[in-house]
Structure formats: structure tokens, C-alpha cells
Amino acid sequence: MKTTDKVLLGFGAVLLAAISLFVYIILAKPELLADSNVTSEPLPQAVVTYDEENGFVPNEIAVSVGESVIFKNNRASQPMYVATDPHPAHSDYPEFETMIALAGAYPEIGQDFTFTFKKPGRWWYHDHADPDMTGVIVVR
Ligand SMILES: [Cu+2]
């Protein structure tokens, strides 16, 4: 066997071993490829309640990337329109906005709003119909 054949054979063996290992990782141990902080289980959902007297409670809440926050509208007579700051441009985190989540529909009285945060940051928001009512979601 010529030297070049041996080199090619050795290279082929190493390549085959690498491919086998990769396939093993993909099929048997997918968690090895994932970020250690990321699991395949659904993340918990945080709840923020909203009413005229107390505003958004808790006013500041920390969640993980991929976690959802449910904004519960406890106001009796008005819709809750959660929107990213600043008012009225809503440009900080444009997807974090009730009407975008509702595909352009205005929220109804008593309607809750759920948003899954995918971007880390400190996201101030307000009720677009009552912009003095504010809160912040810290996404880590
Ligand atoms: Cu606004």
C-alpha cells in the first residue's frame, strides 16, 4: 500500500469517526448541542395583572428569554392595550404590542394579552389607551 493510500485511508477513518460522533450527538444527546440554560421543556409563564387602581402588578418582573408573560386585564370598563415604549411610536420592541399580536384588531374589554419575549433587554411598556400606566419586563 502506498503512503498516499495510507494517508487517504487514515483521513477517511477519521472523517467516518467524526460523522458517527456527530450523528450520535444529534440523535442520542441533542442537549449536548444546546445552550446549557435552554431546555426542551416549556418555560413557565409569568402573570401581570392590570387594573385602574394598582396599574400593572408586579410593576417590574424578570423573565427568561423564551418565557411568556400573561397580562391579565382586570379593568371593568376599558380594554387594556399593552404597548412597548416610547408612546406613541412603540419602537423599542415593535412586536411587543397588543394590536400587532391581534393582527391589527383593537383589544376588547376584558381581553388578556400574552407575549413571549425573545429578545433580552429591559422593556418598558404602557397602556396605550392610558399611557401614564407603565411597567417594565426584564428579559435575561
Ligand atoms: Cu402608546
Image (cartoon, helix red, strand yellow):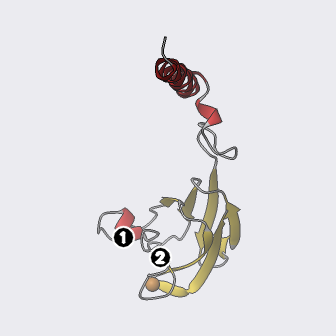
Which of the 4 quarters of the picture holds residue 58? Answer: bottom right
Identified by mark 2, the residue type is: Ala
- Confirm or reject: label 1 Cβ below 8 Å from ligand 1: no
**Residue nearer the viewer, 18 or 25:** 18
Element marked by disc 1: helix
Disc on res. 9: none
What crowding class fits label 1: few (fewer than 14 Cα within 10 Å), some (14-19), or many (20 or more)? some
Q: Is residue 121 left or right of residue 12?
A: right
Q: Earlier in the sequence, mark 1 or mark 2?
A: 2
Residue 18 place in picture, x, y as percent: 55, 26
- The residue that mark 2 highlights is 83
Q: CA distance from mark 1 to mark 2?
A: 8 Å
What crowding class fits label 2: few (fewer than 14 Cα within 10 Å), some (14-19), or many (20 or more)? many
Element marked by disc 2: strand
Is 97 rendered above or below residue 17?
below
Residue ID at (43%, 88%): 88
Name the quarter showing ligand 1.
bottom left
Disc on res. 99: 1
Is 126 rendered above or below residue 108?
below
Residue ID at (36%, 70%): 99
Say if mark 1 contacts mark 2, CB within 8 Å.
Answer: yes
Is 125 rendered above or below residue 72?
below
Residue ID at (59%, 73%): 51
Residue 33 place in picture, x, y as percent: 60, 38
- Confirm or reject: label 2 Cβ below 8 Å from ligand 1: yes
Location of the C terminus by quadrant is: bottom right
Residue 107 seen by the camera: no
**Residue nearer the viewer, 38 or 4:** 4
Identified by mark 1, the residue type is: Met
**Residue nearer the viewer, 126 or 18:** 18
Residue ID at (67%, 76%): 54
